[in-house]
Amino acid sequence: MEIARLNEKTLVIKGSIKKETDYQEIKRHIAPMLEGGIKNLEIKILDATSITSSVLGYFLKLIHKDKIELVIEVGDDRLFRLFQELSLAEAFRLSYLNL
């Protein structure tokens, strides 16, 4: 997995999100953004087909506890359907990436 910060409120994730280290890496990239006081966060997941429960839980924490407006854009239909099946599409303001 590779993570790049596009701007002060946007992260781009490329590759699989499968390991515990992926979760830690995502948190490590988001933490400084939160310390900077952002309240809107956009995450672009380019090509992952699934996501770990720890990352899902972290994203839900951002929304419900930290009161961050989170928008997730995905590039793979399988991940999009997974979010829908878990009833998370609305919470994550889910949309497809415009590639």
Image (cartoon, rainbow, N blue to C red):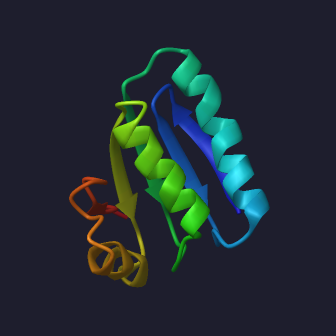
Q: Position of residue 97 (x, y in %)?
A: 34, 62
Q: Quadrant of the C terminus?
A: bottom left
Q: Is residue 35 left or right of residue 89?
A: right
* Vertical relation: 53 (above or below) 35: below
Residue at 54% over, 73% down: 48
- What percent of the width, then of the height, locates residue 70? 35, 42
Residue 7 vertical position relative to residue 36 in the rendered view, above or below: below
Image quarter of residue 52? bottom right
Residue at point 47% right, 15% down?
37
Residue displayed at 42% across by 30% down: 66
Residue 72 % position (x, y) = 37, 54
Q: Residue furthest top?
A: 36
Q: Which residue is at a point 33% across and 47% down the rendered structure image? A: 71
Residue 21 % position (x, y): 78, 59
Q: Say left or right for 53 vs 80.
A: right
Q: Is residue 54 left or right of residue 87?
A: right
Q: Nearer the viewer, residue 60 or 47?
A: 60
Number of disc labels? 0
